[in-house]
Structure formats: structure tokens, C-alpha cells
Image: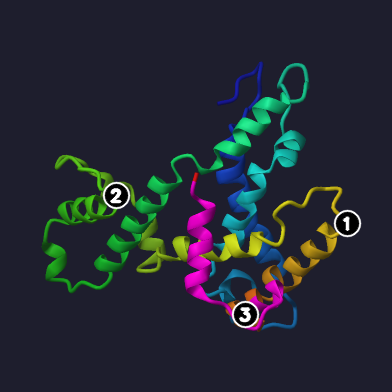
């Protein structure tokens, strides 16, 4: 939290998980807006929910790259660059708690889908117990009966049965980011790869099917979801 002496300081998770994530949504919407498209084909209005979180989670990957951390960070008083060994430790810790995080996301998606598949009569049952039961089943952690975690699950209303898109979009973005993996600011192919990403993924909007945009960017005629899921699991494994 900022003070008169220090200003506002951001943690790595603030930068990578919040700022970059929301910035990903912003540039996706801006670049997908075209004057010659109908409203329903413009910006985020035209993106399928299965894909809506892909560019936002995609850009989080750069927040864990050493050269990006070095570029964005400095001592708030002296301006001194962050030590190399600390940058490496931050970058290498990117998969810390990832297993728990995605088990958690799966449990939230399961709850969201279950709630929006129920009749009004069934919704009269104890929603807290249902939430805790699904959480325990996915996370393998005992949830206290007094826990009221369900009360802060705000995305349940906005996503309305489509919260699973976070997990599915993450699988997409891991595959897409494989074209950028290992590239730095000095890499000659960085610009062409970035322009391909802009053209096929960010600018296409509703003008083409998202899965076709993924194929075009990856330069393939087929996308195997099982292989994509395996690629995702391997990338979140320590």
C-alpha cells in the first residue's frame, strides 16, 4: 500500500497475476474491435467463453520471464536493478503451488456448473455444504463445516456456468506460449512471432473460430486436445 514516502509498490504477483492479466483482456478487446464488424463480432463481445481467458492468462507468462522481471523491477529508492540470483529464484518459483491452484480452479468450475444445472427446488439445499463437498473432492483437503468460502465466489454470477473457461483457456495459452518460449528481446524471430499472435489471436475476434485461430498461429491443421492437456500438465509440474 502506498505512502507519501514510498508511493505504491507492487509485488510480483500484483504485476504478473493482476496487472498483466487485466492488460491482456484490454489489448484483446482493443485489437479485436474493428469498424467494419457488427457489434456481436467486435472485441470481447465476439469471443467464445471457452477462449475468453486465453490472452489474459497468456500474458501472465511474460511476468515470469527473467528478462521481463529485470526490465520491470528496480529498488524503489535507489533505482538499482534487482540482483540476478533473486530474479532467477522468482522465475524458477513460477510453478509453486500450481497443483493446488488448478485443483482449486477445477473445484470452483465444478461448483459453478452444478449450481447452474440445478432446479429452483434443489437450490434450497445447503449451498455451503455442496461447495465444501466439491472442494474436498477436487483438492483432497478437508474443509471446515463453518467455512463460508462460497460467499466470496463472485465469478459464479458473472460467468454463470462458464467458469470452467479459466482452466480450458489456460490449456490454450500454454500451447500458444510454446512459440515464444526461449525467445528474448534480442531474438530475431520475436517480432514476427508477436505479429502472428496479434493477427491470429488478438485481432481475429469473431471473424474466425478460435480453434482455427490457434491452428493458424501454431501452423498446424490439427489440434489434439489430449496432447494440449498433457502439455499443460507438464508445464505446471515442478
Residue 120 in the image: above or below residue 212: above
How much space separates mark 2 and mark 3, taking CA atoms? 36 Å
Magenta segment: 215-237
In-image side of 10 versus 82 (left or right): left
| Residue 34 % position (x, y) | 73, 76
**Mark 1 burial class by Cα count in 10 Å: few <14, some 14-19, many 20+:** few
| Residue 50 % position (x, y) | 49, 71
Residue 181 in the image: above or below residue 76: below
Q: Which residue is mark 2?
A: 139
Considering depth in this image, is 218 or 212 the residue closer to the camera?
A: 218
Under circle 1, the secondary element is loop
Q: What main secondary structure does the magenta stretch of the protein show?
A: helix
Q: Which residue is mark 1?
A: 188
In-image side of 13 versus 226 (left or right): right
Instruction: State the image quarter where residue 47 is shown.
Output: bottom right
Under circle 2, the secondary element is helix
**Mark 2 burial class by Cα count in 10 Å: few <14, some 14-19, many 20+:** some
Front position among marks 3 and 1: 1
Front position among marks 2 and 3: 2
Q: Residue at x 36, y 52 (%)?
A: 103
Amino acid at each position: 500500500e502506498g505512502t507519501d514516502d514510498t508511493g505504491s509498490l507492487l509485488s510480483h504477483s500484483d504485476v504478473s497475476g493482476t496487472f498483466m492479466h487485466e492488460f491482456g483482456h484490454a489489448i484483446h478487446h482493443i485489437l479485436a474491435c474493428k469498424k467494419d464488424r457488427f457489434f456481436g463480432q467486435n472485441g470481447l463481445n465476439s469471443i467464445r467463453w471457452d477462449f475468453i481467458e486465453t490472452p489474459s492468462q497468456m500474458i501472465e507468462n511474460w511476468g515470469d520471464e527473467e528478462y521481463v522481471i529485470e526490465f520491470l523491477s528496480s529498488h524503489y529508492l535507489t533505482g538499482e536493478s534487482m540482483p540476478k540470483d533473486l530474479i532467477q529464484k522468482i522465475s524458477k518459483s513460477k510453478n509453486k503451488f500450481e497443483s493446488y491452484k488448478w485443483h482449486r480452479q477445477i473445484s470452483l468450475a465444478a461448483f459453478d456448473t452444478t449450481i447452474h444445472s440445478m432446479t429452483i427446488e434443489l437450490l434450497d439445499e445447503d449451498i455451503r455444504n455442496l461447495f465444501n463437498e466439491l472442494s474436498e473432492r477436487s483438492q483432497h483437503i478437508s474443509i471446515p463445516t463453518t467455512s463460508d468460502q462460497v460467499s466470496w465466489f463472485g465469478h459464479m454470477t458473472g460467468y454463470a456456468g462458464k467458469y470452467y473457461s479459466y482452466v480450458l483457456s489456460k490449456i490454450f495459452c500454454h500451447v500458444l506460449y510454446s512459440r515464444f518460449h526461449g525467445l528474448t528481446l534480442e531474438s530475431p524471430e520475436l517480432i514476427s512471432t508477436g505479429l502472428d499472435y496479434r493477427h491470429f489471436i488478438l485481432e481475429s475476434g469473431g471473424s474466425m473460430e478460435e480453434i482455427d485461430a490457434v491452428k493458424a498461429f501454431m501452423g498446424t491443421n490439427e489440434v489434439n486436445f489430449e496432447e494440449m492437456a498433457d502439455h499443460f500438465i507438464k508445464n505446471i509440474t515442478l
